[in-house]
Amino acid sequence: MKKTKITMTRRQVLKTGLCAGAGMMLPWAFNRKAYAEALSYGLSDPALQPKFVEFAPNALDPGFLFKDLNQDGWPSHKPNFSIRVKQAIQETGLVNPRNGRKLKTRIWGYGNDNVTWPGQTIQVMTPSAGGTDETVIRWTNELQGKKHLLPVDTNLHWCYSLKGMSSANGVDYTQYSIKKNGVPIITHVHGGHTDYQFDGNPEFFFSPDGNVKGPQWDFVPGGYTNNFRYDNNVQAGNLWYHDHALGITRLNVYAGLAGFYFVRDEFDTGKPGNPLDLPAFPYELAYAIQDRMFLADGALFYPAYPGDPFYDDFIYDEEANLPEELFPGGGPTGLAEFFGDHMVVNGKIWPKADVEPRNYRLRLLNGTDSRFIVVQFRAVPLGSTDLSNAGEPLDFYVIGSDQGLASEAKQTNTLVFEPGSRYDIVFNFAELDGKRIVMSNIGGDAPFGGEFGDALDSDDFFPDRQTDRIMAFDVVIPKSSVPDLFDHTVIKNTNAAVPVPLEGVTTRKVALFEGKDEFGRLQPLLGAEINGEWKALPWHEPTTETPTLNTTEEWEIYNFTGDAHPVHLHLVHFEILGRNVITFDSDDGDPGQEVKQHNGEFGVAPSVTNVIVGAPVTLGPSDGYVENAPKDMVTALPEQVTRIRATFDKEGRYVWHCHILSHEDHEMMRVLQVVPS
C-alpha cells in the first residue's frame, strides 16, 4: 500500500498541483469562470444590490418574540407556544437593478398566522428567575406542497430513502415522497438540555399532519407527538432552533427554518437594571447571519445541476460518476459545501441599524451552511457601502458564547465564528458619533483551513466579492438618559471556567475523515479508534459513542482532513481543553478502507496510521479565538487533535455531527447513545 505523509494544507497541495489520496481531494479554488457564467444565466448579481439600506429586524424586539400562551391574560395551559411551519412571501431587500423595484422571495418559516425567516424568537425564564421547569412547544408541519422549495437529492441517505429493517422499524420509506406526503421536518433546539425524544434527532422526522413518522418514534413510550418539552433548569444562554430532518437539513434551513431561542436567568434577565448591568432592550440586539444566492427575480437559488456554481468543482473535478437513471441530466445532486454570495442578516441583505453612542450587546448567530465568518468592526464615513475608506479594526468584548456567559470578558478586534455557533459581544459606540461602523468579514468564500485576512489569496474569494461586509451600524441617534453601566470586569461565570483534569474521566478518541461515496462524490465522515485502528463510519454503522449516564468524558477529536469542521454534540455543553498538532500517514485511497453506504453500495475513505500527537497549539483572542465560555460547538482545525470535556446526564439516543449542513446531510453525523449506568 502506498503511504504518503500529509505535511501540507490542501491550499498548498492545490497550488503545487499535487494530490495525496482521497482525504485530500476537496477543491479549494472555485471555478470562477463557471460562477461568472452562472451569473449571466439568471442569478442575482450581488454587486448590483443595495448595501446598508434596509433596517435589520432585531430578534429581541418585544414585537419579534413569540407570545407565551400562558401569559398576558391567556388561560393557563400547555403548550406555552404553538408554532407552525409553512410557506410565505418575504421581502429581503433585493431589488430589480433595472428599475429599483423591490423583489419578493418565497420562503419557509416558523410562526403563527404569519411566518417569517428567521422565525420569531422564543424567550423563556429559568425557575430561578420565576419561570417554570419546562417549556412545551407544539410544532405543526404545514408543508403539504407537491415539491420542495429547493432541489432534493433523493440518492442521499434521507427521510424517504430508508428501507425495510435498515429503517429500524421495518417500514420501507421509499414508498413515500414529497409529492405524495409533503416535506418532512423535525425541529432541533440547538443547545437545549432535552430528553432524547424531543431533541430533534433526524430520525424523529414527521410529515404534515404526522401521517409519516420517522423510525425512532416506534421506540418512544407513548409514540409520536408534536408537543415537545424543553428543560428550563439551565443557565441563561443563546440557543437557536432549526430543522434537522435526515438528509435535507441543509435545504430546510436554507429555505428559512431557523430562529433564536433565549434562556434568561436571575443574573442575565434581559431587562434594564439586571444584576450584571448588561445592556438590555433596546440596547441588546440579536442577529442571525446567513449567506444565500438568489435568482434575478428574487427566488432562492441552491446549486445542484450542471452549470450551477461549484458543480464543476465537486462533481466533474472529482471525477464523480452520476448515473443518468438516478441523476437525470446530471442532477439534482448534493454538493460538498455551499457559499452564498449575498450576506443576509435576519432575512435582510446587507442591512443596517441606527444606534446611540453607547454600549450595545450583540447576540450573534452564524447560521450559514459552510461559511466560517471572521468578524471585525471598522469605521467608515456615513453613507459608505464598502471598506475602501475603512479604519483599523476596533476592539470589542466577547462576554459569552453558545451556552452562557464566559469565565471573564475578553477583549479582541477579530473573532473566528464557526457555523452553528453563537457569540455574545459588547461593542461600545461611545466615541464613534456620526460614523458608520461596518461589521466586516475577513474570512474567505471557501473551506476554512484556519487562515484568514492576508493569509488568503484570490482563489479564496468570489469575483467582485461583496461578502467582506455583513451589516452596518450608523451612530446617528442622540444618547438617551438611560444609564450605560456596562463594566467588563463584572462578567464572571464560574461554571464556564475550564476545570483541572479529573481522575477517572473516560477518554474517547473520535475522528474526522474525508472520503468518496459510491458515485465518487466527496463524502465527509466521522469515525473512531476501534481496537487500535482508525475507522471511518457512516450513520448506520453500530454506535461507537456510548457514554454512561452521569459520567464525564474527554473527547479527543482527531481531524484527518484538510479543512476545519465545526463539531456539535447534542444534549451537552462542554469545555474546550486545548489542541495539539498531529502527524499521521494516509494512503491514497487505493485500497483505503471501504465505507458501506445506506443503499448497500460502497464508497472509500483513506486509511490512517502512525498517528503522533505533537506540540500544543495555543489559540486566544489575539488569534481570533475566544473559547472560555460553555460551548456546544468547537472548531476542529485540520491536522490537529481538539480536546473537549462534557458530562452526559440524560439517557437516550442523541447525535453528534459536523455543523457544516452539507456535511451532516452526507454522512458526517453519528448516533450518540447515552446508556444506563
Image (cartoon, rainbow, N blue to C red):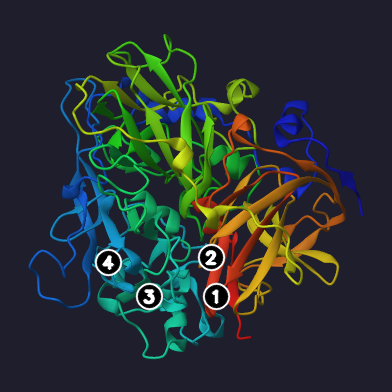
Count residues near mark 3 (Cα–Cα under 10 Å), then give few for <14, some for 14-19, many for 20+: some
Farthest-out residue, left: 73
Name the foreground residue: 438 vs 458: 438
Residue 622 in view in this figure = yes
The residue beneath circle 4 is 130
Q: What amino acid type is highlighted by mark number 2?
A: Val
Residue 6, horizontal then vertical, whole percent: 83, 42
Tell me the element at label 3.
loop
Q: CA distance from mark 1 to mark 2?
A: 8 Å
Q: Which mark is residue 239?
A: none
Q: CA distance from mark 4 to mark 2?
A: 24 Å
The residue beneath circle 3 is 176
Q: Are marks 1 and 2 in contact (CB under 8 Å)?
A: yes
Tell me the element at label 1.
loop
Q: Quadrant of the N terminus?
A: bottom right
Tell me the element at label 4.
loop
Name the foreground residue: 176 vs 511: 511
The residue beneath circle 2 is 572
Q: CA distance from mark 3 to mark 2?
A: 34 Å
Name the foreground residue: 653 vs 424: 424
The residue beneath circle 1 is 649
Q: Earlier in the sequence, mark 1 or mark 3?
A: 3
Q: Are marks 1 and 3 in contact (CB under 8 Å)?
A: no
Tell which tag, 4 or 3, sits nearer the viewer.
Answer: 4
Q: Are marks 3 and 2 in contact (CB under 8 Å)?
A: no
Q: What amino acid type is highlighted by mark number 3?
A: Tyr
Quarter occupied by residue 380: top left
Q: CA distance from mark 1 to mark 3?
A: 36 Å
Residue 338, horizontal then vertical, whole percent: 49, 42
Q: CA distance from mark 4 to mark 3?
A: 45 Å
Q: Is residue 664 above or below residue 538?
A: above
Farthest-out residue, bottom: 221
